[in-house]
Image (cartoon, helix red, strand yellow):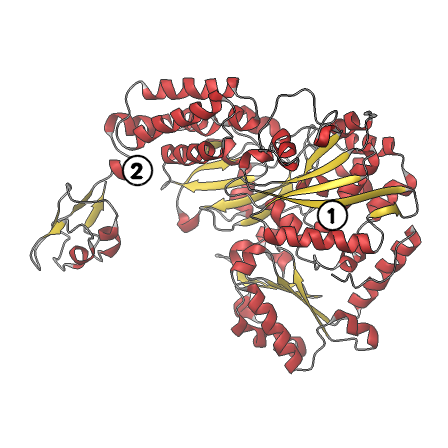
Amino acid sequence: MSTGVTDIIRSVDDLTRLAEGHRQKLSQQRTRVLVCAGTGCIVSGSLKVYEEFGRVLAQKNLTVDVSLVSEGKAGQVGLVKSGCQGFCQKGPLVRVEPSGILYTGVSPEDVTEIVNTFTDGSVAERLLYKNEDGPACRTQEDIPFYNLQTRQVLTKAGLIDPEEIGEYLAADGYRALAKALLTMTPREVIEEVTLSKLRGRGGAGFPAGAKWNEASHQKNKPKYIVCNADEGDPGAFMDGYLLESDPHSILEGMAIAGYAVGAEHGIVYVRAEYPLATKRIKIAIEQASQIGLLGENILGCGFSFDVEVFVGGGVFVCGESTALISSLEGKVGEPRQKPPHLADRGYLGKPTVINNVETLANVPIIIRGGAEEYNQRGTEKSSGTKIFCLTGKVNNTGLVEVPIGIPLRHIIYNIGGGIKDGKKFKAVQTGGPSGGCLPAEMLEMATDFEELAKAGSMMGSGGMIVMDVETCMVDIARYFLNFLKDESCGMCFSCREGILRMLEIVEDITEGRGTAESLELLMETADMVKSASMCGLGQTAGNPVLSTIKYFADEYRTHIIDKKCPAGVCRELISYTIDAELCTGCRACAGKCPEKAISGNKEEAHIIDGTLCSKCGICLVTCKFDAVLKS
């Protein structure tokens, strides 16, 4: 794909000149329309919105191609497919610059109305985001979901075209790489990253500087930098969206890492379920290579670095570093014992550094502004910000970036807007399937590596699933155990059989077969799997069980002793009856019942036969008189 930039960058002066040239082109546009083309908005129909903008703008004889601006057609409209703008729940999103107006839930039918505002200065008020208890928000910066965040890694996401390197250059892209190559030694780069206290954002939280330092001392060549984009946690999508929205920041981080440790080869390991992320990182590699920011003798300083993409098969365990290396080498994705560590013997037996997507995206920020500035955010042990995928029973879902250490309550209630339908908060699950479920009394807890671990959860890659009172915590444990059972590589007997046994016990509890011994056996098994498994999957597989038992033991006991599911989720433990005083005998529920379990004459109270009822709940949904009771 053409970069839109024809020059080869051989020096920092070339980099400055090209960046300034593209900034001038952008500044000549009177209006710039950014249609979100992240996966979430694409699913909601944003590409059709983009096409309709192109059609309407052409019909009105407004320029849509930024390259035409240089031909003297200033004052027209630029149309861009941006990366993810973050507020996924409200898509398709359209941002209009320079006013910063953000339109939500845009359909193709709305486009003409929006385009008309470009000439008459009005605003399409009905498409603005509206707070429940306040006025409509004209700009993105007015919306609490955005203005309560600290967008550092996501600062360019949604504001640039991820398939156009010129836009990344115009936003000071690759300036950190130039600074590192031309003004710093590899040792100084490592020291700066170490001083920044950057920790791995993929789950384990290992200090990036320590990992780089170990690899830098290895004499064996060649060395490799691997970007771990094997994001497989349910409810997590931050790495995929970073690759979709700002791919050059990851490439810049990889190149800086390569310079620091003496590596000349980079590999992006991305799972097959991320086709758009794969496409855009490949485009970014091609564009950066075309203009000399990847490849031989970058910026004329003698450093060479190339990057390739490897598409993995989508196995959760391949997020573990040694399993990822095994997969890269064409073998089954299975972990191995350490040592030797990957910094000593990794890909093809050579020194290898693996950092996840978000970790690498932080590197240019650190090098450009310095560790001291970077340390202004975060905690004493963990500087910077963390991106969370806020999902579940919360009003505002999407990508959220906040300083490490911010309380859970701030994320869920201030940014997330609280619980849907005004229901009561019950728990939040952090850290993906290997994380834990935390109750309401822990909402003031800091979201950092140490505090979450103490509570029986983990930071993980950044999944954050919010649950309300209608969630059954025993069922949640069952769900994650079922996921881990399928994703275990099976190498360790403790993990393979232990997770399966935990699942069987939890299923017994949810189906009314739990006994007084079930909880003790469940905890013993979870501890065994944790202590006897080789990799992180098995070592953390018990977290969903142990945390839900720790904080919601009464719910387990109600399932076991009373044979009831308080949340009304576990089908075997619920029943449906009809209140004879409220039932009008309208026959609506009987007509819908697939099992013919409801009997009664018209205009007389009906009865549900529990022996025939499949507990599908359709009677509850159908009844207009609230006569059907669930217990």
The picture places residue 355, in percent across and down from the top left corner, at: 69, 36
Mark 2 or mark 1, which is nearer the start of the sequence? Answer: 1
- Left or right: 116, with 188 as reference point: left
Asked if residue 256 is positioned above or below residue 86 in the image, the reply reads above
Q: Quadrant of residue 108?
A: bottom right
The picture places residue 375, in percent across and down from the top left corner, at: 75, 35
Tell me, for residue 596, which label it has, or none. none
Outermost residue, bottom side: 60
The picture places residue 438, in percent across and down from the top left corner, at: 47, 32
Outermost residue, front side: 330
Question: Relative to the observer, which residue lies in front, 565 or 615?
Answer: 615
The residue located at (26%, 33%) in the rendering is: 564
The picture places residue 12, in percent across and down from the top left corner, at: 91, 51
Secondary structure at badge 2 equals loop
Q: Residues within 10 Å of mark 1 (few under 14, many from 20)?
A: many
Asked if residue 240 is positioned above or below residue 603 in the image, the reply reads above
Tell me, for residue 249, which label it has, or none. 1
Secondary structure at badge 1 equals helix
At label 2, which amino acid type do we have? Answer: Cys
At label 1, which amino acid type do we have? Answer: Ser
* Residue at image mark 2: 570
